[in-house]
Amino acid sequence: MIYLLVFLIVVSVAVTLFLNLHPVFGGNPSEKHEVEYKNLDHYVNGRFVNQVPTSMNMSFTDSFSMMKDFFSGDKERSPVGQIPISEINWDKINSDKDSLTWFGHSAFLLSIDHNKILVDPMLGPVASPVSFAGSKRYTGGLLHIINEMPPIDAVFITHDHYDHLDYPSIRKLKDKVGHFFVPYGVSTHLIRWGVAEDKITDLNWWEETEFKGLTIALTPSKHFSGRGPFNRNSTLWGGWVILGKQTRFYTSGDGGYDQHFKEIGEKYGPFDITLIEGGQYDRRWSWVHMTPEEAVKAHLDVNGKIMMLIHWGSFTLAYHGWTEPIERAVVEAEKEKVNLIGPEIGETVLLTREISVPVSSWVE
């Protein structure tokens, strides 16, 4: 009995040290940050909250059903073997035309007004703080792509979850990036990972700034944050508006459907292209992730012209089939007469006035 007790104490100490000392878990907002945040309407008792009350508690029945689905759910939750990535056309990316290159999930490279912008550049092989657990990337790790990238003017982060803010990716990118734009509090992670503080701009919801001729704004989403058991909702989350001379761009970040999309459309729309999350959904967490049908509705709410579905195609984080998000989005887009594009991973789309990229490679 004494040996078991000693073992449990040693394991507990080891886990606590790992959680506190390993940099992958990021940092925590300082007292200075907390003083800055305390007067915000969406900062309550030391934690950020959504614009509308959002309960994230799951019933015992739902928790039990989720465990059951984990072992006996959809057999097509992941592809059979690795899926291919298109050969990246760097000449196209480096041209003087606005373009978009998707790396799967919510990671993409935006070329706009001669600026190279990476959004949620999670290019690592696993969406987890440790390599031996978590969802493996369908294409395998894409960190090598960073070596081929041109200098990056800015990186934009929507929130600090592992499938969006990746420690290995930021470490590899940090000396190649001119500036980082993040929601309140996320800078603490980047600083711990070696990014210079003067290269980071923290923004609040609805806050705007200018960058190399672009107008940038962080917009609300209905979600949550946290990289460890002790820092949930200590940083903010959101979507990004990026307005250039030729292209008005919006990406939703993660989050459930709500009234904020209409508010975004009224303030910043119309958008030439929207990237809306519509994967990793489940009725048991409908408040923090949208279904494909809700994603199409959000696109219409923000007054978008062309839509691309994101947050799918790279990781298995939910219990539906891995291609189900795009299949359902195609049906809903046709019903609502929305121009939905579906590029392959690695494919570059030129952001012209009339974009047509078939989703046939994803939908049989």
Image: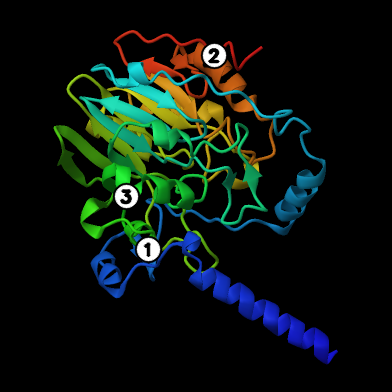
Q: Nearer the viewer, residue 337 or 121?
A: 121
Are discs 3 and 1 less than 8 Å apart at CB? no
Distance of label 2 from label 1 (alpha carbons): 40 Å
Q: Which mark is residue 192?
A: 1
Mark yes or no: residue 141 visible.
yes
Query: Alpha-carbon distance for marks 3 and 1?
Result: 14 Å
- Name the residue: 51% across, 10% down: 358
> Relative to residue 280, is residue 309 depicted above or below?
above
Say which of 155 and 285 sits in front: 155
Is 260 left or right of 103, judged from the image as shown?
left
Do the residues bearing badges 2 and 1 touch, measured as CB atoms within 8 Å?
no
Total labels drawn: 3
Could you tell me if residue 300 is visible in this image?
Answer: no
Give how far apart the Cα atoms at labels 2 and 3 are.
31 Å
On the rendered image, what quadrant is the N terminus found in?
bottom right
Q: Earlier in the sequence, mark 2 or mark 1?
A: 1
> Where residue 289 sits: x, y (%)?
53, 41
Under mark 1, the amino acid is Arg
Residue identifier under label 2: 359
Question: Of helix, strand and loop, which one carries label 1?
Answer: helix
Q: Which residue is mark 3?
A: 182
